[in-house]
Image: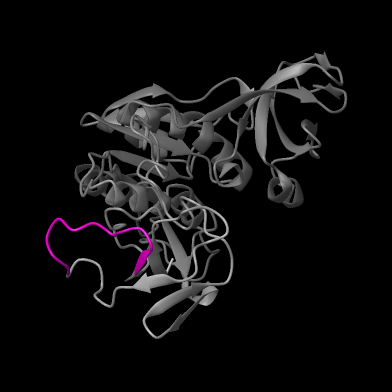
């Protein structure tokens, strides 16, 4: 604190201290503060040799070269001892941990001006002739409401949201061909089914290797992963709930492999109420946490309020009833986990 460095004799403080008018650091080299003396000090200054406490300005009165203290002074008062902020051996950052602005302060304070980080370059390509402004599409259309969300979720990387393109095979091929050299991971959004107008997976098969084109889990079923010129491509469906759950399930899995650490957040938690899976497939169920337990939200890939309230999801087995109090494994959504 701004004030006066002193050698505390205990409480009550001696009356008065003899004030040395020279600011610390300008006195004779190697000098130490004598008992019964005080010297002005500012916040952040090293404590003078011989001093063991600081009297705040507002708790002191100076008259005729003497410092009068309103209250007793104890050893260590308003002093930060060496190692209080970070003791020797403290872990600043673990491998795979995201570097936040708070970490920067600690790193700089400890003399670490550089740190090795993985800063993945990620590109996001919306695909769909119905999208507004899509290259090769008709006038008008609907806005891309998924690409900006994926970009926001990738705040820890270097995401680039590319202009949308129409789902015409040659247009999609050119867009993927141009994007691949500029990124370590490409997300495509839309054209993920096998309909006549869904070109994404057919194009990826021709350009590289489609590792898998889907899974037998409801909601997640259309998500896929491919390799093009050695770069992974994660295919997200063009529906928001499907896209975001596939992003967490497959997209973060691939990104975790790239950086060498698991980025997905899994937990074993208790169900707050009974859940029965009536669908013919294993199903993705959205949950929110209430009082330490998780509760299912209304099912439906197009049910907006459920997605807005969801804090994570789990894959539950078809035909099975899960009882309240039973523990299941769920994955927390990124932005709701920080």
| In this picture, residue 136 sits left or right of residue 229 | right
Which range is magenta? 27-38
| In this picture, residue 63 sits left or right of residue 299 | left
Residue toward you, 185 or 13 = 13
168 shown above or below 58: above
Q: Residue at x 73, y 48 (%)?
A: 309
Residue 154 drawn in magenta: no
Q: In which image quadrant can residue 98 be found?
A: top left
214 shown above or below 9: above
Where does the N terminus fall, quadrant-wise?
bottom left
Q: In which image quadrant can residue 99 be found?
A: top left
* Spot occupied by residue 64 in the image (x, y as percentages of width and height): 39, 86
- For this orientation, the residue located farthest to the left is 29
Residue 28 drawn in magenta: yes
Where does the C terminus fall, quadrant-wise?
top right
Q: How is the image coloured?
A: one colour
Residue toward you, 303 or 114 = 114
* Spot occupied by residue 173 in the image (x, y as percentages of width and height): 29, 44
* Spot occupied by residue 94 in the image (x, y as percentages of width and height): 37, 31
Q: Residue at x 87, y 23 (%)?
A: 274
- For this orientation, the residue located farthest to the bottom is 64
* Spot occupied by residue 179 in the image (x, y as percentages of width and height): 26, 47
């Amino acid at each position: 604190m701004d004030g006066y460095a002193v050698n505390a004799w205990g409480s009550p403080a001696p009356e008065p201290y003899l004030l040395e008018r020279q600011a610390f650091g300008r006195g004779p080299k190697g000098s130490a503060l004598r008992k019964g003396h005080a010297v002005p000090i500012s916040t952040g200054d090293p404590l003078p040799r011989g001093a063991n406490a600081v009297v705040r300005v507002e708790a002191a009165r100076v008259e005729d070269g003497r410092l009068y203290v309103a209250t007793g002074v104890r050893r260590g008062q308003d002093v930060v001892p060496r190692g209080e902020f970070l003791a020797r051996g403290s872990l600043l950052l673990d491998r795979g941990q995201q570097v936040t602005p708070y970490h920067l302060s600690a790193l700089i304070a400890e003399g670490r001006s550089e740190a090795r980080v993985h800063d993945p370059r990620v590109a996001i390509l919306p695909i769909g002739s119905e999208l507004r402004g899509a290259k090769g599409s008709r006038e008008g259309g609907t806005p891309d409401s998924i690409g900006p969300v994926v970009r926001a979720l990738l705040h820890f990387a270097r995401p680039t949201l590319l202009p949308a393109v129409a789902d015409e095979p040659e247009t999609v091929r050119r867009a993927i061909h141009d994007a691949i050299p500029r990124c370590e991971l490409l997300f495509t959004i839309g054209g993920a089914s096998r309909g006549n107008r869904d070109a994404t997976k057919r194009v990826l098969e021709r350009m590289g290797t489609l590792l898998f084109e889907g899974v037998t889990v409801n909601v997640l079923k259309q998500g896929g992963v491919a390799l093009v010129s050695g770069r992974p491509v994660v295919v997200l469906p063009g529906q928001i709930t499907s896209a975001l759950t596939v992003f967490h399930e497959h997209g973060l899995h691939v990104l975790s492999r790239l950086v060498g650490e698991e980025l997905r957040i899994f937990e074993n938690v208790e169900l707050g109420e009974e859940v029965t899976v009536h669908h013919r497939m294993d199903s993705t169920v959205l949950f929110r946490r209430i009082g330490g337990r998780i509760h299912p939200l209304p099912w439906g890939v197009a049910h907006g309020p459920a997605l807005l309230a969801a804090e994570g999801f789990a894959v539950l087995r078809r035909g099975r009833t899960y009882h309240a109090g039973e523990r299941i494994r769920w994955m927390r959504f990124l932005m709701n986990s920080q």
